[in-house]
Image (cartoon, grey):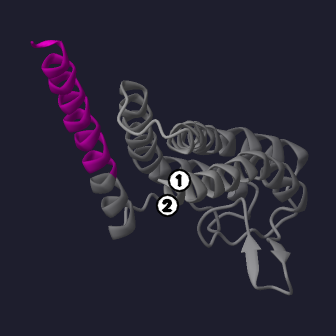
Amino acid sequence: MNKIKCVSGFLKYLFQLLFIAIPILQIIGWIAAPEPLAFFEHIFKFTVIPGNYEILHPLTIHERFAGFGLGMVPTAIELFLLYYLIKLFQSFQRNDIFSISNVTYIRNIGYALFAEQFFYPFYQGLMGVIVTMNNPSGHRYASVTFTQVNLGILLTALMVILISWIMAEGYRLREEQLLTV
């Protein structure tokens, strides 16, 4: 049980750090856009613009605000996901393993994963329109892609939701058993 508490505490703090860092990176990323943010001598690069769009003009303030606004939709989904991961591992850290609240957290994690992967192709296409709309004619792009990675995460999300249903049923059966004399 001590290992579960230790690992859960570590993951909770990691997700809390990400919960704070992701919106900050979004803001800084749109200030620097279209250039990626590079950390640790180009080992880690972060860009707020998905895909390989060829941007042939400096981004205007309106394009930056529109891109930031659109980018906040998947960011909000990611923050929703991180919030429930934090709650789940906080619960595990307290040795509260098999509870109905954990079932809810797991279900919401599955829903967030599903929503993120469902929305992402449309987000990518709209972002292409925003960042290339002032390119010269013939150099404006909008691409909607759905890859094996998206499909894999969608299937994982469905499995997570199914697991939450199974856990809810197990919790219900356990409660019935405890009430039966």
Q: Which residue is mark 2?
A: 143
Q: Is disc 2 placed on a helix, strand or loop?
A: loop
Lower sequence index among marks 1 and 2: 1
Q: Callout 1 environment at 10 Å: few (<14), some (14 to 19), or many (20+)?
A: some
* Residue 174 location (% of width, % of height): 19, 26
- Overall secondary structure of the magenta section: helix
* Residue 118 location (% of width, % of height): 39, 46
Question: Closer to the camera, 106 or 181?
Answer: 181
Q: Is disc 1 placed on a helix, strand or loop?
A: helix
Q: Is residue 73 above or below residue 56?
A: above
Left or right: where 164 falls relative to 44 = left
Provide the residue span drawn in magenta: 157-181
Work out which residue is located at the far front of the displayed protein and give it.
Answer: 181
Q: Which mark is residue 125?
A: 1
* Residue 98 location (% of width, % of height): 35, 35
Q: Quadrant of residue 136?
A: bottom right
Kind of residue indicated by mark 2: Ser
